[in-house]
Image (cartoon, grey):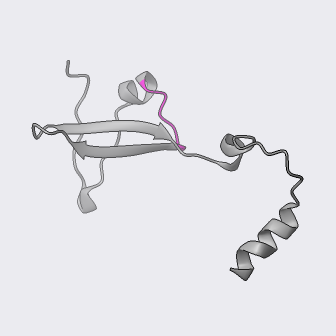
Amino acid sequence: MMIANTKIYKNFQTSIPKDVRKAFDINENTIVEWGITDDGQPEIKFRNKVNLNDIIGIVKTEEVTNSVELKKEVYRI
């Protein structure tokens, strides 16, 4: 189903049509991933950028940690 079309401008810039942005909830934090399928067709996927709030709490540990000491350790390596 064809929703819209866009023009390629100088430096190969283009825009994402409004109907597509609304349908996929695309905003300034969206990353567009371009690919080519095994049968040679273009593939476009959208994903949100990952920020610190997205990853806080993913890893849990029983060990008490100190962020200042951890940061110092990173720079010692």
Occupied quadrant, residue 67: bottom right
Q: Is residue 70 above or below residue 22?
A: below
Side of 21 relative to 59 (left or right): left
Residues 24 and 56: in front is: 56
Q: Residue furthest bottom?
A: 76
Q: Position of residue 53 (x, y in %)?
A: 71, 43
The structure residue drawn at horizontal position 36% and vertical position 27%, both measured from the top left corner, is: 20
The region drawn magenta spans 24-29
Q: Residue furthest left?
A: 39
Q: Position of residue 15 (x, y in %)?
A: 34, 43
Side of 15 relative to 49 (left or right): left
Residues 56 and 29: in front is: 56
Occupied quadrant, residue 66: bottom right
- Image quarter where the C terminus lies is bottom right
- Image quarter where the N terminus lies is top left
Judge whether residue 42 is colored magenta: no
The structure residue drawn at horizontal position 25% and vertical position 57%, both measured from the top left corner, is: 12
Judge whether residue 26 is colored magenta: yes
Mark count: 0
Q: Residue furthest top?
A: 1
The structure residue drawn at horizontal position 86% and vertical position 69%, both measured from the top left corner, is: 69
Q: Is residue 57 above or below residue 74?
A: above
Q: Position of residue 51 (x, y in %)?
A: 64, 48
The structure residue drawn at horizontal position 80% and vertical position 66%, both measured from the top left corner, is: 70
Side of 20 relative to 67 (left or right): left
Q: Position of residue 2 (x, y in %)?
A: 20, 22
Please name the predominant secondary structure of the magenta segment in the image.
Answer: loop
